Image: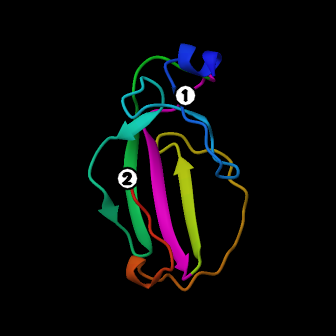
Amino acid sequence: QEACEARGCFWCATNVANAPWCFFPEDSPYGYSVGGNTVKTTKGWRVALNKRQALSLFGNDVSPVMLEVEFQTKDRLRFRLYDPNKQRFEVPLKIDSPGITADEASYEVEL
């Protein structure tokens, strides 16, 4: 708990299995924030994320990063994070998707 709070994080013990006890506050200098409007795509939506500040936990941060969300089936969501300015290797995984709408999904997605 001390190490968590020393980083400026929130500590919240919980009985929920696998839930983190230490997490960044919304206004943390780490991480990314929405950098533009959400664009609807044929199978979901896409939005740019910008690195919040110069602080880095791991190094070699990419900014902006694109977040692409695809509603594949009633019970399956695919999300993809990628560098829009530099092509990188992606595992060539072919997954057939009927492409449902958010209204048809048995889950909710919030940004």
The one of 75 and 20 positioned closer to us in this rendering? 20
Q: Say if 81 sits above or below 109 in the image.
A: above
The one of 1 and 100 positioned closer to us in this rendering? 1
Q: Which picture quadrant has residue 27?
A: top left
| Marks 2 & 1, CB-CB < 8 Å contact | no
Position of the N terminus, as image quadrant, is top right
Rendering coords of residue 81 (x, y %): 54, 49
59 part of magenta stretch: yes
**Magenta segment boundaries in residue numbering:** 58-74
Could you tell me which residue is drawn at 73 percent across and 57 percent down?
91
| Comes first in the chain, label 2 or label 1 | 2
Could you tell me which residue is drawn at 40 percent across and 59 percent down?
110
- Dot 2 amino acid type: Val
Question: Which residue, as the protein is rendered here, is positioned at the far top?
Answer: 6
The one of 67 and 102 positioned closer to us in this rendering? 102
What residue does disc 1 label? 61
Q: Say if 107 sits above or below 84 in the image.
A: below
SS under mark 1? loop
What residue does disc 2 label? 47
| Residue 35 appears left or right of 106 | left
Q: Which picture quadrant has residue 33?
A: top left
Rendering coords of residue 102 (x, y %): 41, 76
SS under mark 2? strand
Position of the C terminus, as image quadrant, is bottom left
The one of 21 and 70 positioned closer to us in this rendering? 21
100 part of magenta stretch: no
Could you tell me which residue is drawn at 54 percent across and 83 percent down?
74
Question: Which residue, as the protein is rendered here, is positioned at the far left?
Answer: 37
- Dot 1 amino acid type: Asp
| Residue 5 appears left or right of 52 | right
How far is disc 2 from disc 1 in space, using C-alphas?
Answer: 18 Å
Crowd tier of the residue under label 1, counting other residues whose Cα lies within 10 Å: few below 14, some 14–19, many 20 or above: few
